[in-house]
Amino acid sequence: FNITRFRLVGHVQRIDRIEPVVILQAHTQPAEPPPSLPALITLHQPCKLTDPSTAFLRAARAGQQAKVLEFLDSGVDINTANANGLNALHLAAKDGHLDIVQDLLKRGANVDAATKKGNTALHIASLAGQEDVVKHLVKNGALVNVQSQNGFTPLYMAAQENHDDVVKFLLSKGANQSLATEDGFTPLAVAMQQAHDKVVAVLLENDTRGKVRLPALHIAAKKDDCKAAALLLQNDHNPDVTSKSGFTPLHIAAHYGNEAIANLLHQRGADVNFSAKHNITPLHVACKWGKINMVSLLISKGADIEAKTRDGLTPLHCAARSGHDQVVDLLLENKAPIRSKTKNGLAPLHMAAQGDHVDAARILLYHRAPVDDVTVDYLTALHVAAHCGHVRVAKLLLDRKADPNSRALNGFTPLHIACKKNRLKVVELLLKYGASIEATTESGLTPLHVASFMGCMNIVIYLLQHNANPDIPTVRGETPLHLAARANQTDIIRILLRNGAQVDAKAREEQTSLHVASRLGNVDIVMLLLQHGAAVDATTKDLYTPLHIAAKEGQEEVASVLLDHGASLTATTKKGFTPLHLAAKYGNLNVAKLLLQKDAPVDAQGKNGVTPLHVASHYDHQNVALLLLDKGASPHATAKNGHTPLHIAARKNQMDIATTLLEYGAKANAESKAGFTPLHLCSQEGHTDMASLLIEHQADPNHRAKNGLTPLHLCAQEDKVNVAAILVKNGAEVDSTTKAGYTPLHVACHFGQLNMVRFLLQHGASVDKSTAVGYTPLHQAAQQGHTLVISLLLENKAKPNAVTNQGQTALSIAQKLGYISVVETLKVVTETTITTTTTTTIEEKYRVVAPESMQETFMSDSEDEGGEDPLVSDQQHYRYMTVDDMKSLGDDSLQIDVTRDERAESNRVSMAPSLGVSDLMLGPHHVKEQYAQSSSNHAPDNVDLYRQPVHVGSNFKI
């Protein structure tokens, strides 16, 4: 196919990828065929399994039915999906594993589950040509006309890949071939572009579309050229042909008020009630543009005066919104439904109020439009006028007895809205007509709260002049002062304080405005509040002072001001943290310096005994740790569990902190309460550099904890061979025993650490050393079922006939525990007589034995204080939103454009009159007459299947 005949370039659309990310080059040369299925399959490299869910998905893809059922029986979530949203059903469908598809659906798999880009199993099976799977999916209720994020249907997928049998089946089940992608491409178009003759034939046989588009007739209608239009229509052209944006020539004539061409079109059979995109009729268009003669003509020709758009707009809504009062009057004289509402409940009166069309509103009210009619959110026309600041319409409504205290669904009154939008004239008007100055929303906001937060100074002043109470709390206990502090409204705070606002009013969590300002770092507000007597050490519910919060947030200037006003350096939170603890936790060096300059206790201990140095070490804030040490912090301080800062640094592999601590005299062999040293901790974690550093500072590689564990035992447990090599090189005993007699080799065998077993044996570990209960490493490995470890031990002369204190051999233990492969390995080397004796004399239930372990309580990243005060918790961000993200005041929000139908621009009947005919009439309803290629720039699911779909086509003070 010559691709230029379509006036566009076909391009590859990425749909789904099974595992590896495969990015295919767009096929911009029509002569070059798309990649074949085998070619694509070879692009998929196997991914290493990492967990049961991944293994489950791999089994589904590979058609391993037994494994799939086994995973499901073990509790794997049937709907688990990979990062691209592909689940087991998608993968089985793709490769035609019908038995697995059947099992998954029987077990409740969602047949219409979609990937991240909206592709279902039916999309995937259709693309892959898996006819049997397609039939089974549809039989089980799969939606045949489901569209992915870019508008692709299963029919499109099958058509693209030349799967004519799948196409026939989908059509027989109601597949709609008129459904196009978001760029306007249909299954027929892609089949033609791909030269799939059979599919094209099937689609054409089932095609029920009308005639092709005829833009020439639209141009004639725009120019009011009746001769040209008549000539075109003589050639048997359809008078209701639609443009790419879905409008007929009569819509064009209505837009421009061309009555002559409209009459001609009607004479030739044009449908006067033709519903274009979004159900827009010619009458809607004429009313929107105020073409009164056209409106009259259309009504005389039978235009439906009650016709509604997709969003419920009638012609009367259109005329009222645009302020065409003569058209409004004409429509009402012809019995237009004055009470008709959009889907959001907007009446024509709301529309007139939004546009400040007083005459249109007056006509509607004259014809008895309900003045307090409400939307689905209980917004009246007065709410709308207040929002938009339309004083004239607001006065008209109030004069017609509109309720000035009507409450929207969230409790906002027109006065709240006027305060939020800084409509002072409307505020004055509303109060003059009896609006309540202390009305509250569902969350307790008064008009003064709203104006204070939004920084509407003139309205705040006006409300206070009219006796608004500055101390009314919201349901969260916040006063206007809190909200003004939250929004950094310094001038508003000054006005509130000078007019009697309580400076230490507490909100629900007992935070004051000073807490709020301290967190946000507004020094001016902090100073202002302190000058008006704010309590510098006021505490929240969890005993946070403003200084705690400033330290946490790194607000150095605020902290300095608070300290200058006598803030306590030793005040502690419920968990025992001082401001210095918080500065250390969050790495706020300058605040820490300031606190220490003011003689903050450097070794203050929290509830668990942690000092600021512990905290700084835990969070790897070396600069703070060095500062604390320079200021006399003890490197030997122990927490409740006996850990020193060096223990923490060693476990978390913080080399710089550890080096600094050691330079300041920290003891490398410091013991926790359980006897563990920093070397124990870093050995278990496998930190080689840390181990070397500690040993350089005389850490004992043979130091035994209270239960006898040495660092080498912990290396053996975690298979940390690199650290073990350092320990052995520095004199660690390979056969050191715990209190129960376990050597590192026992431990390694118990945990199946083959590399560590090999390492220990190579360094002379005793292969037959027994524990206190007589277990050799071989017994331990047999008990745990580690066949490879057993083989390695046997190769190193382990004695298979050795018995425990209870007379058990390694073989008898394996037999009792049912380890078949271990039994097979041991029975050929174990003497039969001994085996018989042990298996017949040991009757009691086998008791598993295990080596000692390190039971230490470590400091948690998230629970170092056992939980944070909600005031400083990031999850409670609603208390500290800024003006930008708090414009709607939490749940008391009102849309910025309250009369936007369905909150979408496409639902508004408005558009700048300067637009041309191709941008027709209802503006946002227009679909651009071009082929967007954005879809080729991103992968819908980052997942590739066989082929990707292709496109063709009074003592008041101030």
Image: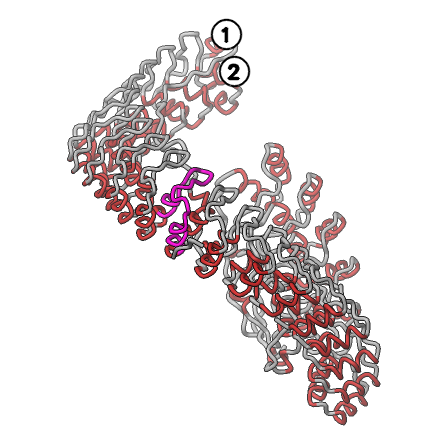
Q: Position of residue 451 (x, y in %)?
A: 48, 56
Colour option used? secondary structure
77, 236: nearer the viewer? 236
Q: Position of residue 180 (x, y in %)?
A: 67, 67
Secondary structure of the residue carrying tag 2 is helix
Residue beneath the point at 15% across and 31% down = 665
Secondary structure of the residue carrying tag 1 is loop
676, 733: nearer the viewer? 676
Residue beneath the point at 65% across and 53% down = 120
Q: Can residue 202 be seen? A: no
Q: Quadrant of the C terminus?
A: bottom left
Q: Residue furthest top?
A: 841
Q: Can residue 456 be seen? A: yes
Residue to which mark 1 is pinned: 842
- Give the spatial CA distance, label 2 vs label 1: 10 Å
Q: Amino acid at mark 1?
A: Ile
Q: Position of residue 737 (x, y in %)?
A: 29, 17
Tell me if 823 is positioned left or right of 606 in this view. right
Q: Amino acid at mark 2?
A: Lys
Residue density around tag 1, few if under 14, some if 14–19, many if 20 or more, within 10 Å: some
Marks 2 & 1, CB-CB < 8 Å contact:
yes
Q: Residue furthest front?
A: 954
Q: Position of residue 718 (x, y in %)?
A: 36, 30
The correct choice, above or below, for 395 with respect to 786 in the image is below
Q: Verify whether residue 508 appears in magenta.
A: yes
398, 322: nearer the viewer? 398
Who comes first in sequence, dot 2 or dot 1? 2
* Residue segment shown in magenta: 492-517
218, 362: nearer the viewer? 362
